[in-house]
Amino acid sequence: MSAEPTIDRSKLSIKVDDKLVRFIGIPFFGLVIPSATGLIDLSAGLSLPVVLSYLYYILTAGIIWEGNRFLLFRYYHIIFDTGSDIKKYVLILGLNIFYTLPVSAILLYAWKWVTDASQVQPNVLWITSVIIIVCVIFVTNMYEKALLVKHSENEMLKSAKLEKDKVQAELAALKNQIDPHFMFNALNSVSYLIEKDTQMAQQFVDKLAEVYRYILKSKEKDLVLLADELDFMHAYASLIKLRFRDALILEVDAINKTGSQYLIPPISIMFAIENAVKHNELSEKNRLYLKVEFYNDNLLIINKLNLRNSVKHSTRTGLINLNERFERLIGKEINYGVEGEQFKLVLPLLKLHLA
Amino acid sequence: MNVIIVEDEATAIHKLELLLGRINPEINVIARLNTVRDTADWIRQHDQPEIGFFDIQLSDDLSFEIFQQCQVNFPVIFITAYDDYLLKAFELNSIHYLLKPVNEDKLRQAIKKFNNLKEHFIHQRVKDLLSGYPISNPSKRKIIAKKGVDYIPVDINDVAYFFSEHKMSFLKRKTGELLTIDQTLMELEEMLDSTTFFRANRQYIVHINSIVKFRSGDQSKLELEVLPSTPEKIKVAKERAREFKEWINRR
């Protein structure tokens, strides 16, 4: 039940430190643009109306700057996820003009109307608007460069985090699946065997060490040779045979030749056996027949059904986890189901074409 | 036969003594030592035993330290619980080891081996291992492969070729046996002697002796036939064909 790794966008949101730039930039444009275009007539000196005009234009510059900044940051994800540079610039430019042109035109006309400045020609207003747009494009370009740097930093963070999440989820899944059950059951058997049959206890411990060592090593690996996994399966099965006094009958068919031509996720056959043992009765009267055979790039694990009463309502979490591993590592799903008196598990294998 | 046991756990000492007695009643444990310090002192003051059994993790230090403190002129079998990195180093240096829990059969085999070979080069090998330079003699080069739960040291000249598939690396022995290895082909390429091995393409590195024949195929590519044979002939790109011919002519 590994959790799907997720990315919290808000935690990775874009932050650009632009306080100083805005503090200088907004008054700068508010003063320079109207002076340069002749929107404000300085020939009469610095009278009160002139000062008021400047303040108004600084306010206008502020509204345009902040508005564009807001839009750029708000739609940043869409803009940067387009993939193509041309689309990106068209989007940015469109956003600029769409906002800047009407806003600056309205604000400029409004001031002309309020102050009744008859000396200002209408074409001066249009020229000013165009200059504002040019300035906005210049400033936006600056922002875009800064955002681009932040964006790639974020992407790197994101992929690093994804990778880490993935590895942790997998490790957790694998650990939860195998260790506690397996080890405690085994220890339980040892403690019984010590009293009952010391020689068997000895054998059991040796095999247990071998099996546990393989499990530990497998954690570093995604896939192993089928032959190696089958070796391990035999070691594991002998543990079960010691525990249940030959109540397990394991039959392995025609696999030796193909063993070194296929890969399989480690511990998966052991899991299948463990699963069969968990769900079915295992006694000298009711033996568990387990057959492992190779068929058509798949490994079939078939056991005769003799369900324990305690597990009639299985959650199948184990099989779901196993399926998740196969999907990710082999690229195919596992199959399982009851066919008549049998439970059949189909594990897809990965073929080695070069072996 | 006089032996010493260097081990800090009482139960482990008892177990080893029990097994040794069962294997050969003539084995005589003349000293049981718990620490690096005591062991080094003992070795300096006594005649050398015939075999030493050294646990690696002692209470004061790793038992390798004994080799730094005094001259060890008798064969040693190391005993360890679980240490992936060390086991590889042991295999590379031909240092014998046993895994815990110690198994009677494996212990018997190890003692038999020593009786047959009477190896006494342990000191140099441990020094090599400690210096982090595991291969003292290039002609004895080995590579560690894995088979099931075991490590197998494979002589480099027993390798027919290496290949990679599904992001895993494999070693094909001349005997036809297929084993997995940890190194990538790129790492192998750097490690291997370039006069005996050739990187044929992205998937194969071949040993010069495993090439049976080669001929020009489509579009000036070379096609190599090797033994044990591969499902398809190994292709060498046009750009590398000349390099291949020069390489194979040099030998």
Image (tube, rainbow, N blue to C red):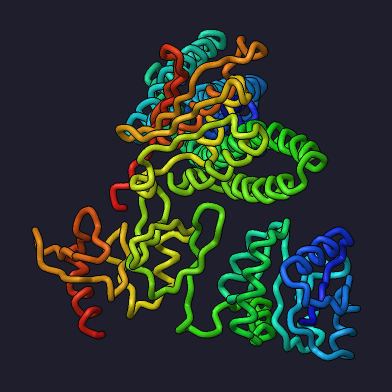
* Depicted B100 relative to depicted A86: above or below: below
Residue A343 position in % (x across, y down) = 47, 19
Give the number of marks: 0
Residue B73 position in % (x across, y down) = 73, 88
Residue B42 position in % (x across, y down) = 89, 84
Note whether residue B135 is visible. Answer: yes
> Which residue shows up at 56% across the image and 23% down it?
A70
> Quadrant location of residue B193?
bottom left
> Which residue shows up at 73% across the image and 56% down it?
B101
**Taking A342 as reference, is B207 left or right?**
left
> Which residue shows up at 56% across the image and 12% down it?
A115
> Quadrant location of residue B41?
bottom right
The quadrant of the rendering that contains the N terminus of chain A is top right
* Depicted A181 relative to depicted B45: above or below: above
* Depicted A271 relative to depicted A304: above or below: below
Instruction: Work out whether residue B146 or residue A96 is closer to the camera in this orientation and state it.
Output: B146
* Depicted B146 relative to depicted A54: above or below: below
**Taking B233 as reference, is A244 left or right?**
right
Instruction: Work out whether residue A154 or residue B53 is closer to the camera in this orientation and state it.
Output: B53
Residue B81 position in % (x across, y down) = 72, 58
Instruction: Work out whether residue B228 or residue B50 is closer to the camera in this orientation and state it.
Output: B50
> Which residue shows up at 87% across the image and 89% down it?
B46
Note whether residue A150 is visible. Answer: no
